[in-house]
C-alpha cells in the first residue's frame, strides 16, 4: 500500500513537472518570437541596444533581441500639415487672417528620433511661427500679388529649421488670405475705379480713331466735288426711306458762292 502511494505521488510529480517544463518552453518560445519585426517599404526601424543607438533598418524582416534591443518605427512618406489660420498684421498695418499647407517628409530616421522628442509637433510649431513672421514682414500688395515668392521664402526658412531633425520640407503653399470687411470694400471701390478708367481710355481711343477716319474722309471728299454730291444724294436716299424723318436739304457751298459773286457784280 505504501509502495503504491509512493508510485502515485511520483507519477503525479512527473506529470506536473512535464507540464511546467512545457509551459516554460512555450513561454521561452513566445519570448523569442516576440523579437520578430516587419518593416514596410515606406518605413524604417531605428534600433537601440541597451539604450544606445545602433542604426536604422528596413524594409524587410528583422529580429530585435527582447529586453536588450528596442525599435522605433519612422514613416518616410510625405506628410501634409494644414497650418491653422493665423491673424497677422502686415508691414503696412493691415490685419489679415492667413492659413497655409506644409509638405514635409523624414529623410534621416535616426535624427528624427534622437534629435527631437516629436518631429511632427516640432515641425508644426515651426510652420506656424514662421508663417506669422514672414507675413508680418510683407506688405498687403506683396501678399496678394507675389504669393509664390512668399511660398518659396517660407519653404526655405522652415526647411532650414527642420534640417537638424532629419526632416525635409518640400513645399509650402499659402492657401487663403482673409481681409477685413472695410479693406474689402476699399479694394472693391479701387477695382471699380480702375474699370471705369480703362473704359474711358477705350472710349477715348475709339473717338480718336473715328475722328481720324472722318478727317481722312473729309480730305477725300474735299478733293472731289462729285464725290461730295454723291455722298449727299446717298444720305438723302437713306433718310427718305423713313417717312417719319424730316428731310433737311443741304445747299452746296458752290451755289452760295455763285449767288454771292452775282450780287457783288450787280
Image: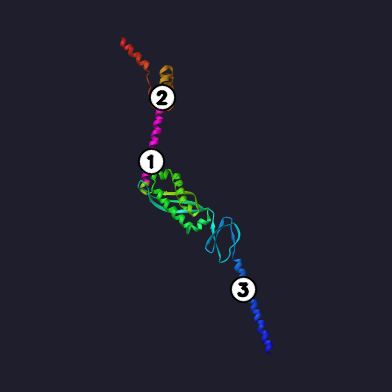
> Which range is magenta?
184-209
Badge 1 local density, few (<14 within 10 Å), some, or many (20+)? Answer: few
- Give me the disc on residue 214: 2
Which of the pair 205/91 is nearer the observer?
Answer: 91
Quarter where residue 200 is shown: top left
Mark 2–mark 1 distance (CA, rounded to whole Å): 33 Å
Mark 1–mark 3 distance (CA, rounded to whole Å): 86 Å
Q: Earlier in the sequence, mark 2 or mark 3?
A: 3
Quarter where residue 12 is shown: bottom right
Mark 2–mark 3 distance (CA, rounded to whole Å): 112 Å
Residue holding disc 3: 24
Q: Are marks 2 and 1 in contact (CB under 8 Å)?
A: no
Disc 2 element: helix
Which of the pair 1/76 is nearer the observer?
Answer: 1
Quarter where residue 77 is shown: bottom right
In the image as oriented, which residue stretches furthest toward the bottom?
1
Which of the pair 91/32 is nearer the observer?
Answer: 32
Disc 1 element: helix
Amino acid at each position: 500500500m505504501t509502495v503504491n502511494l509512493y508510485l502515485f505521488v511520483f507519477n503525479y510529480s512527473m506529470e506536473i513537472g512535464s507540464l511546467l517544463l512545457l509551459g516554460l518552453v512555450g513561454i521561452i518560445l513566445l519570448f523569442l518570437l516576440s523579437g520578430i519585426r516587419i518593416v514596410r517599404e515606406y518605413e524604417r526601424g531605428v534600433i537601440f541596444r541597451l539604450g544606445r543607438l545602433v542604426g536604422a533598418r528596413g524594409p524587410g524582416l528583422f529580429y530585435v533581441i527582447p529586453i536588450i534591443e528596442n525599435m522605433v518605427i519612422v514613416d518616410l512618406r510625405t506628410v501634409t500639415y494644414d497650418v491653422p489660420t493665423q491673424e497677422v498684421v502686415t508691414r503696412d498695418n493691415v490685419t489679415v487672417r492667413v492659413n497655409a499647407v506644409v509638405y514635409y517628409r523624414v529623410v534621416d530616421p535616426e535624427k528624427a528620433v534622437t534629435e527631437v522628442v516629436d518631429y511632427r509637433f516640432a515641425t508644426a510649431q515651426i510652420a506656424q511661427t514662421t508663417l506669422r513672421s514672414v507675413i508680418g514682414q510683407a506688405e498687403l500688395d506683396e501678399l496678394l500679388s507675389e504669393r509664390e515668392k512668399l511660398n518659396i521664402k517660407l519653404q526655405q526658412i522652415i526647411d532650414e529649421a527642420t534640417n537638424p531633425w532629419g526632416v525635409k520640407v518640400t513645399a509650402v503653399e499659402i492657401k487663403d488670405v482673409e481681409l477685413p470687411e472695410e479693406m474689402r470694400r476699399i479694394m472693391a471701390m479701387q477695382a471699380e475705379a480702375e474699370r471705369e478708367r480703362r473704359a474711358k481710355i477705350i472710349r477715348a481711343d475709339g473717338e480718336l480713331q473715328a475722328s481720324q477716319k472722318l478727317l481722312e474722309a473729309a480730305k477725300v471728299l474735299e478733293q472731289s466735288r462729285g464725290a461730295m454730291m454723291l455722298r449727299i444724294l446717298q444720305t438723302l436716299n437713306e433718310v427718305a426711306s423713313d417717312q417719319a424723318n424730316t428731310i433737311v436739304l443741304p445747299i452746296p457751298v458752290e451755289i452760295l458762292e455763285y449767288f454771292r459773286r452775282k450780287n457783288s457784280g450787280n
